[in-house]
Structures are given as structure tokens and as C-alpha cells.
Image (cartoon, helix red, strand yellow):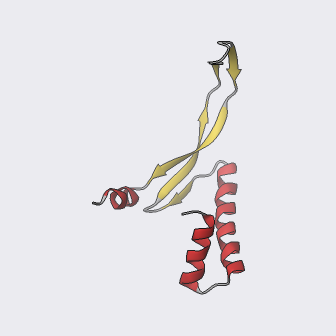
Amino acid sequence: MNKSDLTQALQKETGLTKTKATEVVDLLFNEMSSALAKGDRVEIRGLCSIYVKEYKGYTGRNPKTGEHTRVPPKKLPFFKCGKELKERVDKK
């Protein structure tokens, strides 16, 4: 499922126009992105939690040349699956 599929499903379930459904989906993702950019945690009970994980800098190696290089510290979003989603996906 991608963003347009989600928009279509919202449109079908609620009877919203395509424009309004797109606005709702965009608002949802923009708010989630903004929260993560501020360092907040996004939690959707039963589905997932997403939070920002900080990684320290380290000395890496270019596999092509073998040259050592400094990799700066970084922050990346980390997705953790919820219990209900795990159970639903694992159901046979």
C-alpha cells in the first residue's frame, strides 16, 4: 500500500472528495514528520511506534579504496512494530 492507495481507501470509507482525502493523509504524515524532527515519539497503539535514534560518529572505511574516513554522528527514525500488528501478520 502506498500513499495514493491510502488516500483512495479513506475516500471510499468516508465519502470525502479526493482533494479532502489527500489533505487528510498529507496532514497526518506532515504532523508525524514534524514530531519526529522535534525529537518526539510517534505512537499508534496496536500498530507501531516510531522514534528518533541517535548514532555516534565512527571511523569507517571506503571499500573501494580502503581509505579510512570519519563518519559524523547522525539521527535516524526507528520503527518498532506493535504487538497486535505482529500477531496479525504472523497469523496463518
Residue 13 position, x and y percent, is 53, 82
Residue 12 position, x and y percent, is 56, 82
In this rendering, position of residue 42 left or right of residue 80:
right
Q: Quadrant of residue 31?
A: bottom right
Q: Residue at x 68, y 80 (%)?
A: 18
Q: Residue at x 52, y 49 (%)?
A: 79
Instruction: In this rendered view, identify the residue nearer to me: 5 or 52.
Output: 5
Q: Residue at x 68, y 73 (%)?
A: 22
| Image vertical order of residue 11 relative to residue 25, above or below | below
Residue 30 position, x and y percent, is 69, 61
Instruction: In this rendered view, identify the residue nearer to me: 52 or 5.
Output: 5
Residue furthest toward the left?
92
Q: Quadrant of the N terminus?
A: bottom right
Q: Quadrant of the C terminus?
A: bottom left
| Image vertical order of residue 91 relative to residue 75, above or below | below
Residue 65 position, x and y percent, is 68, 14
Res. 61 in view = no
Residue furthest toward the front?
64
Q: Residue at x 64, y 59 (%)?
A: 32
Q: Quadrant of residue 55?
A: top right
| Image vertical order of residue 41 relative to residue 70, above or below | below
| Image vertical order of residue 87 relative to residue 53, above or below | below
